[in-house]
Image (cartoon, coloured by chain):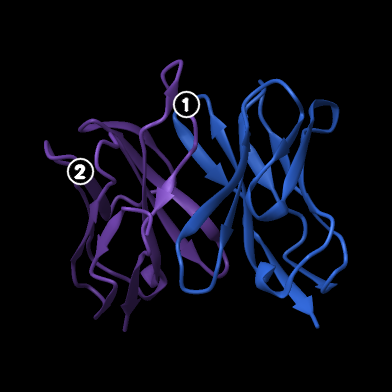
């Protein structure tokens, strides 16, 4: 058990709908990362929050948004869903920072599997 | 552009044989380098990391990796694989812009 909790574990929805994925990081971890994992694209970095502030964005679509709340949990919102959004979405947390950068010791949740029909 | 490349999508080795998984990165400075493992249906788990110093690093489960600056590589090795090592392995790099980028992964198959 990594200490990172993601809900829901599975989600099936229809095209055009909107869903929210939730992540609770390990106790004390200030950084939250979101990744999308699909068979053809591998593990794609979406976005990174540190202590409530957005720190970096990756290949995140405009239809997707995220935030980190004062209690440090994070939510990833996916809207106007398309078939291609079907994937496993991972949240990871980290507390290790060196010279202002995360040292990459990420602790991953078990993921939320999204199926868009 | 900053990138991480794992050239082998699948690798098959016999149980007891040695293993080397390749990872190359493209980055202007010396990055922080990592290997993670993902078992089926699970999240990723850290195997080992390189920040600085000794370029040969030891990790969990008998794995090691060697950083070679001249080749921009960080290959993962294990002298003798076990059937339980069958999983997907990801190389990751911390880029200076607060991103942690993963390679596309190498799926390891073990023959009995």
Crowding at dot 2, Cα within 10 Å, few <14 / some 14-19 / many 20+, comes out as some
Q: Nearer the viewer, residue A102 or B3?
A: A102
Which mark identifies residue B42?
none
Q: Colour of chain B?
A: blue
Q: Is residue A10 toward the left or the right of residue A105 in the image?
A: left
Q: Please give the name of the residue rendered at 19% of the width and 72% of the height, measured from the top-left corner.
A: A17
Q: Please give the name of the residue rendered at 41% of the width and 18% of the height, measured from the top-left corner.
A: A100
Q: How far across and down, in percent of the image, does residue A108 sit? A: 41, 53
Q: Chain of mark 1?
A: B
Which mark identifies residue B97?
1
Cα separation between marks 2 and 1: 19 Å
Q: Colour of chain A?
A: purple
Q: Quadrant of residue A113?
A: bottom left
Q: Nearer the viewer, residue A14 or B90?
A: B90
Label 2 element class:
strand
Q: Chain of mark 2?
A: A
Label 1 element class:
loop
Q: Is residue A68 toward the left or the right of residue A32 in the image?
A: left
Q: How far across and down, in percent of the image, does residue A72 sit? A: 19, 40
Q: How far across and down, in percent of the image, does residue A49 sit? A: 29, 36
Q: Quadrant of the C terminus of chain B?
A: bottom right
Q: How far across and down, in percent of the image, does residue A35 sit? A: 41, 53
Q: Residue furthest left?
A: A70
Crowding at dot 1, Cα within 10 Å, few <14 / some 14-19 / many 20+, comes out as few
Q: Residue furthest right?
A: B17
Q: Nearer the viewer, residue A69 or B4?
A: A69
Residue assigned mark 2:
A67
Q: Is residue B69 above or below residue B41?
A: above
Q: Is residue A36 above or below residue A27?
A: below
Badge 2 and badge 1 both on one subunit = no
Q: Please give the name of the residue rendered at 50% of the width and 39% of the height, measured from the top-left corner.
A: B100
């Amino acid at each position: 058990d990594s200490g990172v909790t993601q809900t829901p574990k599975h989600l099936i929805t229809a095209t055009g709908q909107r869903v929210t994925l939730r992540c609770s990081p390990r106790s004390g971890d200030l950084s939250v990362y979101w990744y999308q994992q699909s068979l053809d694209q591998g593990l794609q970095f979406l976005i990174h929050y540190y202590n409530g502030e957005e720190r970096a964005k990756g290949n995140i679509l405009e239809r997707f948004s995220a935030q980190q709340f004062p209690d440090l949990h994070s939510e990833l919102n996916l809207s106007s869903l398309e078939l291609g959004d079907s994937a496993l979405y991972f949240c990871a947390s980290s507390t290790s920072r060196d010279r202002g950068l995360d040292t990459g010791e990420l602790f991953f949740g078990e993921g939320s599997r999204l199926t868009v029909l | 552009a900053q990138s991480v490349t794992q050239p082998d999508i699948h690798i098959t080795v016999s149980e007891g044989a040695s293993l080397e998984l390749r990872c190359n990165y493209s980055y202007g400075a010396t990055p922080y380098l990592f290997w993670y493992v993902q078992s089926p249906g699970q999240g990723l788990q850290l195997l080992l990391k390189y920040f600085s110093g000794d370029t040969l690093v030891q990790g969990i489960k008998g794995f090691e990796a060697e950083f070679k600056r001249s080749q921009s590589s960080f290959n993962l090795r294990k002298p003798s694989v076990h059937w339980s090592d069958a999983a997907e392995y990801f190389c990751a790099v911390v880029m200076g812009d607060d991103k942690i980028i993963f390679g596309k992964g190498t799926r390891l198959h073990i023959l009995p």
